[in-house]
């Protein structure tokens, strides 16, 4: 039996207070309204169906999310990238009808679509194939490079500690980034052919994350940490869970332990696909929030809460496919997670970028009905620009 954490008679909270309380299963005035963005093709469709032009796709000022009333949050700057980045021109090696072959400064060669769905390129050659390639990257991942020390965290603390919106920090990616550099098939083989190379990459990244987070967290108080992996598909993870537990989990645990030592106990990773086999390992590491919980791929926030109780926090979990159907299906999908909303520790949202087969009217209807489920007051819903006239 679910408890009910939403109490609409409660005095209005700040966004930060509401987020903290909700994710600790405490009562709130209403639920948190977050979403995960939109495909380029979706935005192009919606502009033909009534969405005003000029909005960015992702969160923040001037975004479609702001237009639909999505609650704000902010990030503490933290540089986990290559320093200096690879520089130089992107070379077009070949151009054909609807696509072109590009070579990027880091050595990546990819086929990019110029017509149709352009979101995900096809990779022909990845930048890391062995130790010599890795050395070019490793020298750009030094934790003490001057570029990583450019943030004045003492000054930033004065800004963030007075913030009325949730403050987060990036915890990086442990296996997703190596996968990006090496390639899906190649890293799968490398785990057996040259496991030491994969381990050195993961360890180097972990040391970088630890150094960056120590610098930031000794000064700035944050409410959550977020990372990403994207290492699962419909059949499960691309790496054997036993190997993940042995090779990757100890590094994830080191970073989660560091975060918790600084009071950060809401820690998520963004991983698509069927995450069920990795969830218990992440929980053991201290990573306790799953996102975006892709339903069609086999992940389900309702089942995860039944299995792990209040040990697990959740974001997402609204099946994007339901939004391309009718209003009845949209309501049914919202009804499916209604108990989780009441229970707390859950922020409902579409379980990935919204696809182009979702109409503008359907998405507006989904947002309005979701806000009703979250306990938003009538006047709050009517104030959302994207819902005007409904």
Image: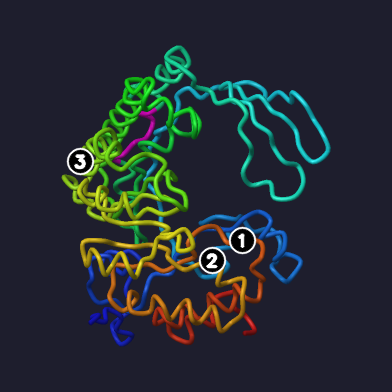
Where is residue 243 shown, x and y percent of the image? 29, 36
- The residue carrying pointer 2 sits among few (fewer than 14), some (14 to 19) or many (20 or more) residues within 10 Å by Cα, namely many
Residue on which the image places disc 1: 355
Q: Rounded to the nearest whole Å, what is the CA distance between mark 2 and mark 1?
A: 7 Å
Reply yes or no: does residue 374 show up in magenta. Answer: no
- The residue carrying pointer 1 sits among few (fewer than 14), some (14 to 19) or many (20 or more) residues within 10 Å by Cα, namely some
As helix, strand or loop, the secondary structure at mark 1 comes to: loop
- The residue carrying pointer 3 sits among few (fewer than 14), some (14 to 19) or many (20 or more) residues within 10 Å by Cα, namely some
Q: Rounded to the nearest whole Å, what is the CA distance between mark 1 and mark 3?
A: 37 Å
Which one is in front in this view, the residue at disc 2 or the one at disc 3? 2
Q: Are marks 2 and 1 in contact (CB under 8 Å)?
A: yes
Does residue 66 lie above or below 170 as drawn?
below
- Viewer-proximal residue among 95 and 234: 234
For the N terminus, the image quarter is bottom left
As helix, strand or loop, the secondary structure at mark 3 comes to: helix
Q: How many marks?
A: 3
* Residue at horizontal 70 percent and vertical 66 percent from the top: 46
Residue on which the image places disc 2: 320
Where is residue 298 shown, x and y percent of the image? 42, 60
Which range of residues does the magenta coloring cover? 148-154
Would you identify the image quadrant in which residue 214 lies?
Answer: top left
Mark nearer the N terminus (1 vs 3): 3
Would you identify the image quadrant in which residue 150 lies?
Answer: top left
* Residue at horizontal 72 percent and vertical 41 percent from the top: 113
Residue on which the image places disc 3: 258
- Viewer-proximal residue among 29 and 243: 243
Does residue 202 lie above or below 10 as drawn?
above
Would you identify the image quadrant in which residue 254 lies?
Answer: top left
Q: Rounded to the nearest whole Å, what is the CA distance between mark 2 and mark 3?
A: 35 Å
- Furthest toward the left, the residue is 261
- Furthest toward the right, the residue is 97
């Amino acid at each position: 039996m679910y408890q009910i954490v939403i109490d609409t008679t409660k005095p209005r909270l700040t966004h930060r207070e509401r987020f903290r309380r909700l994710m600790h299963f405490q009562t709130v005035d209403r639920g948190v309204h977050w979403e995960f963005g939109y495909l380029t093709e979706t935005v192009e469709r919606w502009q033909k169906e009534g969405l005003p032009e000029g909005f960015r796709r992702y969160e923040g000022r001037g975004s479609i999310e702001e237009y639909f009333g999505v609650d704000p949050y902010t990030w503490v700057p933290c540089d986990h990238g290559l320093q200096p980045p690879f520089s130089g021109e992107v070379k077009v090696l070949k151009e054909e009808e609807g696509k072109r072959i590009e070579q990027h400064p880091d050595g990546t060669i990819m086929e990019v679509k110029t017509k149709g769905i352009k979101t995900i390129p096809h990779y022909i050659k990845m930048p890391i194939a062995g130790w010599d390639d890795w050395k070019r990257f490793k020298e750009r991942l030094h934790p003490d490079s001057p570029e990583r020390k450019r943030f004045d965290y003492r000054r930033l603390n004065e800004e963030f500690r007075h913030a009325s919106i949730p403050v987060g920090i990036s915890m990086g990616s442990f296996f997703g980034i190596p996968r990006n550099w090496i390639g899906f098939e190649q890293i799968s083989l490398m785990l057996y052919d040259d496991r030491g190379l994969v381990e050195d990459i993961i360890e180097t990244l972990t040391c970088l994350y630890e150094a960056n987070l120590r610098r930031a967290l000794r000064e700035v108080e944050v409410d959550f940490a977020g990372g990403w992996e994207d290492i699962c598909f419909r059949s499960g993870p691309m790496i054997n869970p036993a190997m993940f537990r042995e090779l990757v989990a100890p590094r994830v645990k080191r970073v989660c332990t560091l975060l918790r030592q600084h009071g950060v106990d809401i820690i998520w990773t963004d991983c698509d696909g069927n995450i069920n086999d990795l969830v218990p390992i992440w929980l053991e590491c201290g990573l306790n929030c799953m996102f975006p919980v892709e339903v069609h791929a086999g992940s389900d926030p309702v089942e995860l809460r039944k299995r792990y109780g209040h040990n697990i926090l959740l974001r997402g979990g609204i099946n994007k496919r339901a939004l391309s159907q009718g209003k009845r299906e949209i309501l049914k999908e919202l009804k499916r997670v209604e108990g989780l909303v009441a229970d707390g520790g859950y922020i409902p949202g579409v379980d990935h970028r919204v696809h182009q087969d979702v109409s503008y009217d359907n998405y507006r209807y989904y947002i309005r009905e979701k806000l009703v489920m979250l306990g938003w007051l009538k006047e709050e819903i009517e104030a959302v620009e994207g819902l005007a006239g409904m």
